[in-house]
Amino acid sequence: MLNLAIAESSQPDRGQRLVKLLLLSILALFIPLILNLASLYIVAAVLFIFLGLVLFKDKLYFFLALSIPALAYGQFINFPISVNWIYEASLTEVFIILVFLIFLIDKFINGQLEEIKVNGLLYLLAAYLIISLISFVNLIDFRLYIAGLKTIVFSFLIYFLSLNLLNSRRKINLFIYSLAATVLILSCQIFIKFYQIGLSDKFFFERSSIVIPLGAIATTAAILALILPLVLSLYFFLDRDNKIKPWLFIAFAVGALAMFLTLGKAAIFSLSLGLGYLFIKLKNKRIIFILAALLFLTASFIFFSSFFSGLVERIGTTFIDANSKFRILEYQTGWKIIKDNLWFGVGAGQQLYYFKKILNFDTAQLVNNFFLQAWIDFGVIGLTLVTLIFGTIYKKAVAMTKKIKSLNSVIALGFISALLVSLVNGLAEVTYFALPYAIVFWCLMGAFYNLEKYE
């Protein structure tokens, strides 16, 4: 009788939720019609959200994990904004927006908004997003503003979602599996590009001009360096009879080789530090590390001798090559902009405009240091917020090393190793302000903050 009463009471609740959902869908279609903004994209988005709420609201974590390997397919979705402006988006961006909307609408319909998880790091990201929006007052180039703002918006969204959705061992493992799949896809794209240019040394002497669907080779190498320690840690953690374990090892080996072929000094150096950290902490795995390193070096020297020589040459000319000279010029130019805009910066995305103007370049790129980039964009306020953000992450990492002492510490150490790689690489390359890298990093951070639930 009690079960029957519960079932009967749940029927009206389900009906009320369905009515709310239907009304919200009608409203979402009705408002664009009033504002004369209706389009096929809006209709399709509303339908996807409706179907997502009905069919997949309990599987949102799966689509969140799927958004990471989707980065490898680049920006191929076009939205015409004006006659001379077509906004390009990736499948990952579509996944994130849909998952975010479905998550919020589901919580609203079910009266569970108070169950949404937030923390201090999310508030700091929100503050950074707010000053990014306010920087509109310094606007010079609207398209650059949108491009700069987009990275910050999606960083906030992906961290918010991963913090709320990647909250169990099964879900975090699924996320790491998606990272391994991303490594395999990106590595295959690098190998194909290497083959297309005739296996020549152009691959590393002209690496700045070589791109794959995700973007520049340097960004791809940075993402591989970030992911690989985490993939390796899950490989060490899983039982021997786990069928996915061999694939994790293959992903790590293939990803390490692909990253080596890019000859990114900062990526290789930061990954070496991350793996060195794991080598020190995982005492019972040191023999495996040593044997794997010897095998990799031997194979690289025999089969990729030109790349091995190229790496040695790049390291030997670190302080005198054209790349290093450009970095010095870049930092000098950045400091000049900072002195003229010390407190509030030049605004989101506007640094590219100033670099083109001052350096007289046809194109410009982001600064190869995330502290300097934040200072240029948003002045002392931005620099302070970035310092607080990474100070918060550092405190969490220290607390994690003290809290988890079981076998699960292998996973925690993998996350901490990835954070070390990210911090070091971000001091010499464009990382956190590049959209693909930012999405991977902040999704990783959300999972990291849920490691207490891994047990």
Image (cartoon, rainbow, N blue to C red):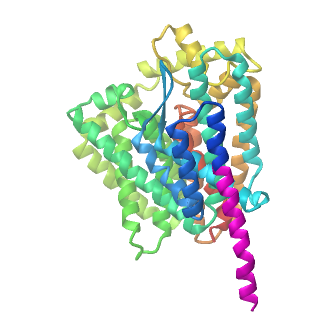
Residue 156 appears in which quarter of the rendering?
Answer: top right
Q: Position of residue 53 (x, y in %)?
A: 60, 59
Q: Is residue 449 visible?
A: no
* Foreground residue among 153 and 411: 153
**Residue 409, relative to residue 441: is it above or below?**
below
Q: Position of residue 56 (x, y in %)?
A: 55, 62
**Residue 332, relative to residue 406: is it above or below?**
above
Q: Is residue 59 left or right of residue 130?
A: left
**Residue 383, relative to residue 260: is it above or below?**
above
Write the residue at 27% across / 41% down.
192
* Foreground residue among 437 and 98: 98
Write the residue at 66% across / 34% down.
34
* Foreground residue among 61 and 364: 61
Q: Position of residue 454 (x, y in %)?
A: 62, 67
Q: Is residue 78 visible?
A: yes
- Quadrant of the drawing holding the N terminus: bottom right
Q: Secondary structure of the magenta portion, mostly?
A: helix
Residue 320 appears in which quarter of the rendering?
Answer: top left
| Residue span colored magenta | 1-25
Q: Residue furthest bottom?
A: 1
- Quadrant of the drawing holding the C terminus: bottom right
Write the residue at 33% across / 40% down.
261
Residue 121 among those drawn in magenta: no
Residue 24 among those drawn in magenta: yes
Write the residue at 38% across / 56% down.
251
How many marks the image carries: the answer is 0
Q: Position of residue 22 (x, y in %)?
A: 65, 55
